[in-house]
Image (cartoon, grey):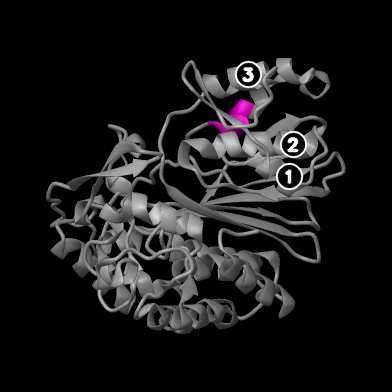
Amino acid sequence: AAGHPATAEVGLRVLAAGGSAADAAVAAVLACSASESVLTGIGGGGFATYYDAASGEVTCLDFFCSVPGLDEDAVADPMTPIEVFFGGVPMPYSIGGASVGVPGVPAGCGEVHRRWGRLPWHGVVEPAALLARAGVAIPEAQARTLVSVAPALTPGDGAEIYAPGGTLLRGGETLHHPGLDRALDALAEEGPDVFYTGKFGKVLVDAVRVNGGALGHADLQAYTVLDLPVVHAPLAGYHVYGRDDLNGTLRTLRALPDDLATMARPARAVAVADALREFGRQRLGDTTNVSVVDADGNACVITTTLGIGAGVWLPGLGINLNSMLGEGELITPDLAPGDRMSSMMCPLVVVDDDGALVLAAGSAGASRIRTALVDTLLGVLIDDLDTEAAIERPRFHVVDDQVHAELGCPEDEL
């Protein structure tokens, strides 16, 4: 399951070639840099949750962005304030070199493959490079998102990529990143280090520094993928495993009443709304998710993001860098150079009492990730819906004491 048919096709091809769930997930995440760059890319960060069918073990990895500034000469200029519109509502963001955190996607993909991959590394990266060479059709939904976030994506090299001839891409038109195939070829040949201590590390530092950012070589050299504590939440006789995200998805599930499965739907709606209100903070942003299960029953779920993108491009490589330091809700006073930033992303797996996999899921949506996951889990695990029906049904999102309900939510629940 992925955010673009071309992304999913890459994952399927890798599975068909004998790859594991990890191989396919990594290949699909790298393909996102060509097919879903409005939402994510190599210059961003993310999280992975892996379920090993043989042992029943769940592992959560953090390859989100780190705060730069470890180099002695690190000085950042002020960020560039912009407004983007989500649902017609203006949201303040900041972009530019000073908004760029240390990217984690190359390192994260490398670590997932190192631990659980079967195919050679170059075989996992190559499908994304082929996709980058050809370009892909941008879906209608991502074209609509592009309209919202154009102020962040069209500076610099993004102008010709997303608005060739001065007009933003529309649904069905070709999205192409000149040079991205070359970057992916080098990644396939030299491994993830090419973006940290290799030749693209200097390109990355120079691009950020010339745009007023603080990121330096010491930041890249210090970057590592982290193992995270795995959090458990019981739900309707099943077991949900994932990381403790900034919006408290697993904590929300644990706060639900034990008798939720037998409650009448109106009462259940109130209980869910109460749990959603108890945790979390509000933010909108761009993210995508890849979920893979292989023939052996292993599952790999990876969620990645660029924020909205810094508008800082690696010259000639078709890679936009993240804007994590410009995401105000992610910044806390205690953050120091080298620290890992927080996120609302929550890739998760669900198993039964015997430890067998039931579901592998993740979501986009920033502060609405939790809403989407909780409602989908309730639909599949309690209401016996298939995943497509559970995802598509109307749901409600809680902001403080307000419920934002989609059209079609049952009146008695409202």
Q: Position of residue 229 (x, y in %)?
A: 58, 41
Query: Label 2 neighbourhood size at 10 Å, few (<14), some (14-19), many (20+)?
Result: some
Can see residue 378?
yes
Asked if marks 3 and 2 touch (Cβ < 8 Å), the reply is no
Q: CA distance from mark 2 to mark 1?
A: 8 Å
Residue 414, disc: 3
Position of residue 204 relative to residue 74, above or below, is below
Residue identifier under label 1: 389
Q: Residue at left 15%, top 51%? A: 76
The magenta-colored residue range is: 248-252
Q: CA distance from mark 1 to mark 3?
A: 20 Å
The three-letter amino acid code for the residue at tag 3 is Leu
Q: Is residue 40 magenta?
A: no
Can see residue 308?
no
Q: Residue at left 47%, top 66%? A: 138
Q: Nearer the viewer, residue 298 or 126?
A: 126
Position of residue 85 relative to residue 268, above or below, is below
SS type, badge 3: loop
Q: Quadrant of residue 164?
A: bottom left
